[in-house]
Image (cartoon, rainbow, N blue to C red):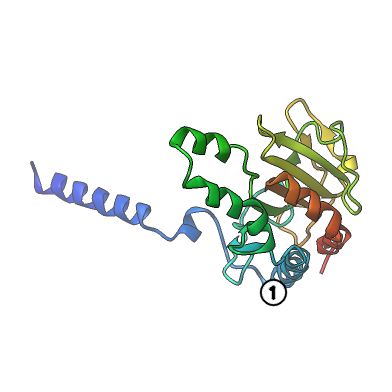
Amino acid sequence: MSIRALQFIATMVVAVFLLLNQPAQAQGNLRAPNPTEQKVLEHYRDTIHSVLDSMDSEDWDTNTDFDVDDNVLVGANPDVPLDVDELVQRSYTVKKDSPLYQREVAPFLAKMQQMNPIQMAQEGKKLKRLRLEVQVHFNRAAADRDAKTKPQLQIPGSVYSFMAEESEDKRSQTVVLLFGDWKSAQQRSDDLKFHFKHPAHTPFIENVEIQLRGSPDRIKEVLHSVDWKKVNDALIAGA
């Protein structure tokens, strides 16, 4: 093999290495938010945190899985005004020795030592699902195609609120809350397309979608105890 050919191969290897190892920000067209976007994102984050904080209780441990934090980056999605690479997600599990734990978990653990594996599996299926995951997204391009027509839960503050899924044993469900002008969304065969009033890459938040997944009992509790109308304070017409 000639020296020129070896040089060409070496150049290609270096080029591929640099391509594969370039920063994620460059690969995904991500960038830091400008001052106006930062102000909008901080307001959104603080508003959503206030809503989610009201879900804390003595029965549940709270974990923040994802957040719109100081390291959030702005994306280049051409279909929405302001796009970021992050969501807000918190998960909740029953707190050991809490009143809920004593009611639902402790009796099972006390009887478990007298059970054989088959009995243990059967009784375990009767336990309530003691976990909840809450995801919060903004500027969703589209929503569930049946959001308008599914039976509505009539949650104050939300435009649409409905059960999206339920497990066969009814121990787990998913409830979706939509905030913003979803009534003007376009009904399509496979989804409900949101009609944004502002162009791409502008500092506006026009809708919020909240998904609650897990314990039906806990979902029912928070649907009626949280002031969901406050979510609308996160909708930002401009800075």
Quarter of the image for residue 51 reads bottom right
Query: On the picture, is 129 further left or further right than 195?
Result: left
Residue 53 in the image, given as x and y percentages of width and height: 73, 67
Q: Amino acid at mark 1?
A: Pro
Q: Residue at x 64, y 45 (%)?
A: 129
The spot of residue 213 in percent (x, y) is 67, 46
Say few, some or many: other residues with alpha carbon within 10 Å of mark 1 (under 14 / 14 to 19 / 20 or more): few
Query: How many discs mark residues in the rendered view?
Result: 1
Query: Which of the 4 image quarters holds residue 182?
Result: top right
Q: Is the residue 47 above or below the residue 102 in the image? A: below
Q: Residue furthest top?
A: 189
Q: Is residue 177 visible?
A: yes
Residue drawn at (74%, 40%) of the image: 142
Quadrant, the N terminus: top left
SS class, disc 1: helix
Which residue position holds label 1?
35
Image spot of residue 65 (x, y percent): 57, 60
In this orientation, does residue 87 appear? no
Q: Nearer the viewer, residue 194 or 159?
A: 159
Q: Residue at x 14, y 47 (%)?
A: 6
Residue at the outermost front position: 114
Q: Residue at x 75, y 47 (%)?
A: 217
Left or right: 36, with 93 as reference point: right
Residue 20 in percent (x, y) is at 36, 52
Quarter occupied by residue 102: bottom right
* Quadrant containing the C terminus in the rendered view: bottom right
Q: Nearer the viewer, residue 103 or 170?
A: 103
